[in-house]
């Protein structure tokens, strides 16, 4: 998910998270017989990892007391390795960040984009995946570069950062919608040529609505020179996601990052990406700017981002 979109309704989100969190009384005492190693991770309740999450299938959804979706599956596997019980707390995106920054939850997940500003208020794990610039395109059409988008009707959701990118494309007309459904409807009707949405959303729509006759394509990221000339083009580049934790949760962050790195190495991460229709070469291979952004900021100067290789 392109979670760099503007944050709104932070106060209501905070209240919502507080209310939902109060409903989780069953897990407040935590599991019995928690090992010293698990207790040493420093979660708010020993043996439990409290997760703020916004339903956003197929990345995150809550079914009963379980988080499902790509991010949910990754966290569930990590939590199992660390001996932690996952306890979801449903909120909206503003509430996700607020819950972490006020340390009312242990973590939030769901395509949260790393940024220099966010890392000042919390901790990011190593990237569970990198979100590529995906386009929903009507069958038979091909768009490879930003130049190919010039003069076309381009759609996205109101508030997403692609709004600014689209507005910078010469001759392009922006079509902004309240939700992804509107983008897909107009794309299928031929009123929009390209829709910019999170990749797994497009892939899921292809399967669920074959009548739309759309395909998923990945935009070749603009060059550094193009971004320098038009800064809004930066949002046409891939972004690195991360699980986001409170500032003082350094032991938990390190443990989760280590498990994420192992999932890259043993093929588990590739398997989960493929489960949801993603291409590991698109989702699990970082661009050069990923390391550059974090080295000397919240990672050592010799840090190497996890990757499945070219």
Image (cartoon, grey):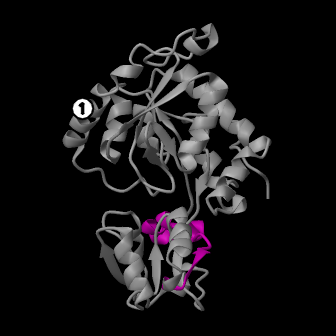
Q: Does 281 sit left or right of 163 as displayed?
A: right
Where residue 261 sits, quadrant-wise, is top right
The percent coordinates of residue 264 (x first, y second) are: 73, 44
Identify the residue at image location x=72%, y=40%.
263
Q: Does 112 sit left or right of 221 as displayed?
A: left
Task: Determine if the magenta segment contains residue 234.
Answer: yes
Q: Does 248 sit left or right of 39 as displayed?
A: left
Check disc 1 and report its element: helix, strand or loop: helix
Decide if residue 40 is in sight here: no
Task: Determine if the magenta segment contains residue 99.
Answer: no
Identify the residue at image location x=74%, y=36%.
262
Placement of 65 over or under 106, stated as above or below:
below
The percent coordinates of residue 299 (x first, y second) are: 61, 34
The percent coordinates of residue 177 (x first, y second) are: 31, 73
Identify the residue at image location x=21%, y=35%.
15
Placement of 286 over or under 64, stated as above or below:
below
Identify the residue at image location x=57%, y=11%.
34
**Callout 1 crowding tier (Cα within 10 Å): few <14, some 14–19, many ≥20:** some
Q: How many labels does the image show?
A: 1
Q: Which residue lies furthest to the front in this view?
A: 64
Q: Quadrant of the C terminus?
A: bottom right
Q: Which one is nearer the viewer's eye here, 14 or 238?
A: 14
Where residue 186 sits, quadrant-wise, is bottom left
Decide if residue 46 is in sight here: yes
Q: Mark 1 points at which residue?
A: 19
The percent coordinates of residue 197 (x first, y second) are: 46, 68
Q: Give the range drawn in magenta.
A: 212-236
């Amino acid at each position: 998910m392109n979670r760099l979109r503007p944050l709104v309704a932070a106060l209501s989100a905070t209240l919502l998270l507080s209310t939902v969190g109060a409903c989780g009384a069953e897990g407040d005492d935590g599991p019995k017989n928690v090992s010293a190693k698990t207790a040493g991770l420093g979660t708010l309740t020993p043996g439990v990892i409290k997760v703020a999450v916004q339903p956003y299938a197929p990345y995150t959804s809550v079914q009963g007391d379980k988080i499902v979706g790509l991010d949910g599956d990754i966290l569930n596997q990590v939590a199992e390795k660390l001996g932690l019980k996952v306890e979801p707390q449903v909120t909206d995106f503003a509430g996700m960040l607020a819950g972490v920054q006020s340390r009312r939850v242990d973590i939030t997940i769901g395509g949260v984009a790393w940024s220099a500003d966010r890392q000042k208020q919390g901790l990011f794990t190593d990237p569970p995946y990198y979100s590529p610039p995906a386009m929903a395109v009507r069958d038979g059409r091909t768009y490879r570069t930003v130049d190919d988008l010039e003069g076309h009707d381009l759609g996205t959701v109101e508030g997403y950062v692609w709004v600014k990118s689209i507005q910078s494309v010469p001759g392009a007309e922006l079509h902004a919608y309240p939700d992804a459904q509107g983008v897909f409807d107009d794309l299928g009707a031929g009123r929009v040529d390209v829709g910019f949405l999170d990749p797994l959303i497009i892939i899921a729509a292809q399967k669920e609505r074959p009548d739309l006759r759309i395909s998923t394509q990945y935009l070749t990221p603009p060059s550094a020179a193009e971004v320098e000339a038009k800064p809004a083009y930066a949002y046409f580049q891939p972004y690195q996601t991360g699980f986001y934790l409170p500032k003082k949760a350094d032991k938990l962050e390190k443990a989760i990052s280590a498990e994420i790195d192992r999932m890259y190495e043993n093929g588990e991460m590739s398997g989960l990406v493929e489960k949801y229709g993603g291409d590991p070469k698109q989702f699990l291979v970082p661009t050069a700017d990923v390391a550059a952004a974090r080295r000397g900021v919240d990672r050592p100067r010799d840090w190497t981002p996890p990757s499945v290789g070219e």
